[in-house]
Protein backbone atom coordinates (compact mmCIF):
# COMPACT_ATOMS: atom_id res chain seq x y z
CA UNK A 1 0.00 0.00 0.00
CA UNK A 2 2.80 2.44 0.92
CA UNK A 3 4.69 1.56 -2.27
CA UNK A 4 1.56 2.32 -4.28
CA UNK A 5 1.17 5.70 -2.60
CA UNK A 6 4.86 6.50 -3.15
CA UNK A 7 4.68 5.69 -6.86
CA UNK A 8 1.50 7.75 -7.25
CA UNK A 9 3.13 10.71 -5.49
CA UNK A 10 6.25 10.37 -7.65
CA UNK A 11 4.18 10.57 -10.83
CA UNK A 12 2.19 13.54 -9.54
CA UNK A 13 5.21 15.65 -8.48
CA UNK A 14 7.40 14.82 -11.50
CA UNK A 15 6.35 17.11 -14.39
CA UNK A 16 9.06 15.75 -16.70
CA UNK A 17 7.71 12.24 -16.33
CA UNK A 18 4.17 13.44 -17.05
CA UNK A 19 5.37 15.19 -20.24
CA UNK A 20 7.09 12.01 -21.45
CA UNK A 21 3.97 9.99 -20.68
CA UNK A 22 1.88 12.48 -22.67
CA UNK A 23 4.24 12.21 -25.64
CA UNK A 24 3.93 8.42 -25.60
CA UNK A 25 0.13 8.71 -25.64
CA UNK A 26 0.34 11.29 -28.44
CA UNK A 27 2.44 9.02 -30.66
CA UNK A 28 -0.02 6.18 -30.10
CA UNK A 29 -3.41 7.92 -30.16
CA UNK A 30 -3.13 11.02 -32.34
CA UNK A 31 -2.58 9.14 -35.63
CA UNK A 32 -5.59 6.96 -34.85
CA UNK A 33 -8.18 9.23 -33.21
CA UNK A 34 -6.80 12.75 -33.68
CA UNK A 35 -8.58 13.24 -37.04
CA UNK A 36 -6.26 16.22 -37.67
CA UNK A 37 -8.28 18.22 -35.15
CA UNK A 38 -11.39 18.18 -37.35
CA UNK A 39 -13.65 16.32 -34.90
CA UNK A 40 -12.52 17.32 -31.40
CA UNK A 41 -15.66 16.07 -29.65
CA UNK A 42 -15.20 12.63 -31.21
CA UNK A 43 -11.50 12.63 -30.31
CA UNK A 44 -12.28 13.51 -26.68
CA UNK A 45 -14.98 10.82 -26.55
CA UNK A 46 -12.77 8.08 -28.01
CA UNK A 47 -9.78 9.04 -25.85
CA UNK A 48 -12.04 8.97 -22.81
CA UNK A 49 -13.39 5.56 -23.78
CA UNK A 50 -9.87 4.18 -24.23
CA UNK A 51 -8.85 5.53 -20.83
CA UNK A 52 -12.02 4.35 -19.08
CA UNK A 53 -11.83 0.91 -20.70
CA UNK A 54 -8.20 0.44 -19.68
CA UNK A 55 -8.61 1.63 -16.10
CA UNK A 56 -11.88 -0.27 -15.63
CA UNK A 57 -10.46 -3.58 -16.85
CA UNK A 58 -7.41 -3.15 -14.59
CA UNK A 59 -9.59 -2.38 -11.57
CA UNK A 60 -11.81 -5.34 -12.34
CA UNK A 61 -8.85 -7.72 -12.56
CA UNK A 62 -6.90 -6.46 -9.54
CA UNK A 63 -9.63 -5.66 -7.02
CA UNK A 64 -11.03 -8.59 -5.04
CA UNK A 65 -14.72 -7.69 -5.33
CA UNK A 66 -15.86 -10.68 -3.25
CA UNK A 67 -13.58 -9.66 -0.39
CA UNK A 68 -14.81 -6.07 -0.62
CA UNK A 69 -18.46 -7.13 -0.53
CA UNK A 70 -17.76 -9.47 2.40
CA UNK A 71 -16.01 -6.71 4.39
CA UNK A 72 -18.81 -4.24 3.65
CA UNK A 73 -21.42 -6.71 4.92
CA UNK A 74 -19.41 -7.34 8.09
CA UNK A 75 -18.98 -3.59 8.65
CA UNK A 76 -22.71 -2.98 8.22
CA UNK A 77 -23.53 -5.78 10.66
CA UNK A 78 -21.00 -4.48 13.21
CA UNK A 79 -22.20 -0.87 12.98
CA UNK A 80 -25.84 -1.95 13.27
CA UNK A 81 -25.10 -4.15 16.30
CA UNK A 82 -23.18 -1.32 17.99
CA UNK A 83 -25.90 1.23 17.23
CA UNK A 84 -28.66 -1.08 18.52
CA UNK A 85 -26.72 -1.87 21.70
CA UNK A 86 -26.23 1.83 22.42
CA UNK A 87 -29.89 2.65 21.78
CA UNK A 88 -31.02 -0.16 24.08
CA UNK A 89 -28.52 0.79 26.79
CA UNK A 90 -26.77 -2.59 26.72
CA UNK A 91 -23.45 -1.37 28.13
CA UNK A 92 -21.94 -4.84 28.46
CA UNK A 93 -22.64 -5.54 24.78
CA UNK A 94 -21.31 -2.11 23.79
CA UNK A 95 -18.05 -2.79 25.64
CA UNK A 96 -17.77 -6.22 24.03
CA UNK A 97 -18.30 -4.74 20.57
CA UNK A 98 -15.82 -1.92 21.26
CA UNK A 99 -13.17 -4.53 22.10
CA UNK A 100 -13.69 -5.87 18.57
CA UNK A 101 -12.87 -2.47 17.07
CA UNK A 102 -9.18 -3.26 16.31
CA UNK A 103 -10.31 -6.23 14.22
CA UNK A 104 -12.84 -4.04 12.44
CA UNK A 105 -10.15 -1.44 11.71
CA UNK A 106 -7.93 -4.18 10.28
CA UNK A 107 -10.78 -5.22 7.98
CA UNK A 108 -11.18 -1.61 6.84
CA UNK A 109 -7.45 -1.29 6.26
CA UNK A 110 -7.43 -4.47 4.19
CA UNK A 111 -10.34 -3.21 2.10
CA UNK A 112 -8.56 0.11 1.48
CA UNK A 113 -5.39 -1.72 0.43
CA UNK A 114 -7.49 -3.85 -1.91
CA UNK A 115 -8.91 -0.70 -3.52
CA UNK A 116 -5.48 0.95 -3.75
CA UNK A 117 -3.83 -1.95 -5.61
CA UNK A 118 -4.81 -0.90 -9.13
CA UNK A 119 -4.28 2.84 -8.70
CA UNK A 120 -0.69 3.04 -9.98
CA UNK A 121 -1.57 1.00 -13.05
CA UNK A 122 -4.67 3.09 -13.75
CA UNK A 123 -2.60 6.27 -13.41
CA UNK A 124 -0.13 4.91 -15.97
CA UNK A 125 -3.05 4.85 -18.41
CA UNK A 126 -4.98 7.94 -17.32
CA UNK A 127 -2.18 10.51 -16.94
CA UNK A 128 -0.65 10.04 -20.42
CA UNK A 129 -4.05 10.34 -22.10
CA UNK A 130 -5.01 13.42 -20.06
CA UNK A 131 -1.65 15.06 -20.82
CA UNK A 132 -2.08 14.35 -24.51
CA UNK A 133 -5.66 15.67 -24.52
CA UNK A 134 -4.50 18.83 -22.75
CA UNK A 135 -1.95 19.53 -25.52
CA UNK A 136 -4.32 18.37 -28.25
CA UNK A 137 -7.09 20.74 -27.17
CA UNK A 138 -4.63 23.62 -26.73
CA UNK A 139 -3.51 23.17 -30.34
CA UNK A 140 -6.98 23.18 -31.92
CA UNK A 141 -7.58 26.03 -34.37
CA UNK A 142 -11.13 26.48 -33.05
CA UNK A 143 -11.35 26.58 -29.26
CA UNK A 144 -15.11 26.09 -28.93
CA UNK A 145 -17.81 23.54 -29.63
CA UNK A 146 -21.52 23.87 -30.28
CA UNK A 147 -23.34 21.70 -27.76
CA UNK A 148 -27.05 21.10 -27.06
CA UNK A 149 -26.93 23.17 -23.87
CA UNK A 150 -24.51 25.84 -25.13
CA UNK A 151 -24.01 27.06 -28.74
CA UNK A 152 -20.50 28.34 -27.96
CA UNK A 153 -18.76 26.13 -25.37
CA UNK A 154 -15.19 27.34 -24.91
CA UNK A 155 -12.95 24.31 -24.47
CA UNK A 156 -10.30 26.10 -22.42
CA UNK A 157 -12.70 28.02 -20.21
CA UNK A 158 -13.15 26.63 -16.72
CA UNK A 159 -16.00 25.54 -14.51
CA UNK A 160 -14.54 26.07 -11.05
CA UNK A 161 -11.05 24.62 -11.66
CA UNK A 162 -11.90 22.12 -14.43
CA UNK A 163 -11.50 23.02 -18.11
CA UNK A 164 -14.65 22.60 -20.18
CA UNK A 165 -13.14 19.83 -22.28
CA UNK A 166 -12.82 17.71 -19.10
CA UNK A 167 -16.54 18.26 -18.52
CA UNK A 168 -17.28 17.04 -22.05
CA UNK A 169 -15.15 13.95 -21.43
CA UNK A 170 -16.97 13.29 -18.15
CA UNK A 171 -20.44 13.57 -19.67
CA UNK A 172 -19.63 11.34 -22.62
CA UNK A 173 -17.14 8.76 -21.33
CA UNK A 174 -17.89 8.10 -17.65
CA UNK A 175 -21.28 6.41 -18.28
CA UNK A 176 -19.44 4.02 -20.60
CA UNK A 177 -17.14 3.09 -17.70
CA UNK A 178 -20.07 2.28 -15.41
CA UNK A 179 -21.69 0.10 -18.08
CA UNK A 180 -18.41 -1.69 -18.78
CA UNK A 181 -17.73 -2.36 -15.08
CA UNK A 182 -21.22 -3.79 -14.58
CA UNK A 183 -20.76 -5.95 -17.66
CA UNK A 184 -17.42 -7.28 -16.41
CA UNK A 185 -18.88 -8.08 -12.99
CA UNK A 186 -21.81 -9.87 -14.61
CA UNK A 187 -19.47 -11.84 -16.88
CA UNK A 188 -17.40 -12.88 -13.86
CA UNK A 189 -20.50 -13.91 -11.92
CA UNK A 190 -22.05 -15.98 -14.73
CA UNK A 191 -20.00 -19.17 -14.11
CA UNK A 192 -21.01 -19.14 -10.43
CA UNK A 193 -24.65 -18.50 -11.31
CA UNK A 194 -24.60 -21.39 -13.78
CA UNK A 195 -23.13 -23.64 -11.11
CA UNK A 196 -25.75 -22.64 -8.53
CA UNK A 197 -28.68 -22.87 -10.94
CA UNK A 198 -27.48 -25.90 -12.87
CA UNK A 199 -30.37 -27.65 -14.55
CA UNK A 200 -30.62 -31.45 -14.26
CA UNK A 201 -29.78 -33.38 -17.38
CA UNK A 202 -32.71 -34.90 -19.27
CA UNK A 203 -32.48 -38.26 -21.01
Image (cartoon, rainbow, N blue to C red):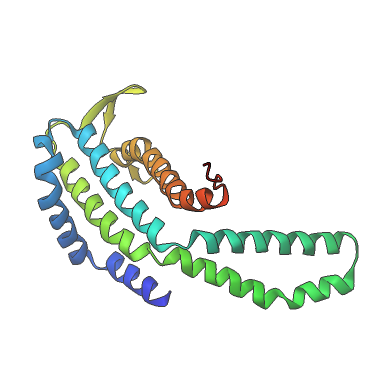
Residue 184 or residue 71, whichever sits in front:
184
Q: Is residue 42 visible?
A: yes
Q: Is residue 54 above or below residue 10?
A: above
Q: Is residue 152 above or below residue 2?
A: above
Question: Residue 183's spot in the image, x, y percent?
Answer: 42, 44
Q: Does residue 1 appear left or right of residue 66 in this picture?
A: left
- Looking at the rendering, which quadrant does residue 175 occupy? top left
Q: Is residue 32 above or below residue 59?
A: above
Q: Does residue 170 appear left or right of residue 189 in this picture?
A: left
Split into 4 quadrants, where in the image is the N terminus?
A: bottom left
Residue 104 or residue 14, whichever sits in front:
104
Q: Is residue 156 visible?
A: no
Q: Does residue 20 appear left or right of residue 123 in this picture?
A: left
- Looking at the rendering, which quadrant does residue 166 occupy? top left
Residue at 17% over, 31% down = 39
Question: Residue 94's spot in the image, x, y percent?
Answer: 83, 70
Question: Residue 188's spot in the image, x, y percent?
Answer: 44, 52
- Outermost residue on the front side: it is 203
Question: Residue 112's spot in the image, x, y percent?
Answer: 51, 67
Residue at 45% over, 49% down = 185
Residue at 29% over, 71% down = 10
Residue at 37% over, 46% down = 161
Counting the numbered discs, the total is 0
Q: Does residue 36 appear left or right of residue 97 in this picture?
A: left
Residue 192 or residue 74, whichever sits in front:
192
Residue 22 or residue 90, whichever sits in front:
90
Amino acid sequence: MFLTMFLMLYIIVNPGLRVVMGEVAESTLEPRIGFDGNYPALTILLAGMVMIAGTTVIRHLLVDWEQMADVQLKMQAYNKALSDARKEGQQARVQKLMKMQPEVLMLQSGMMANQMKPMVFTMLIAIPIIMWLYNFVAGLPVQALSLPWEPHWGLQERLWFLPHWIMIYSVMALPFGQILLRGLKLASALPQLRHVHRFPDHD
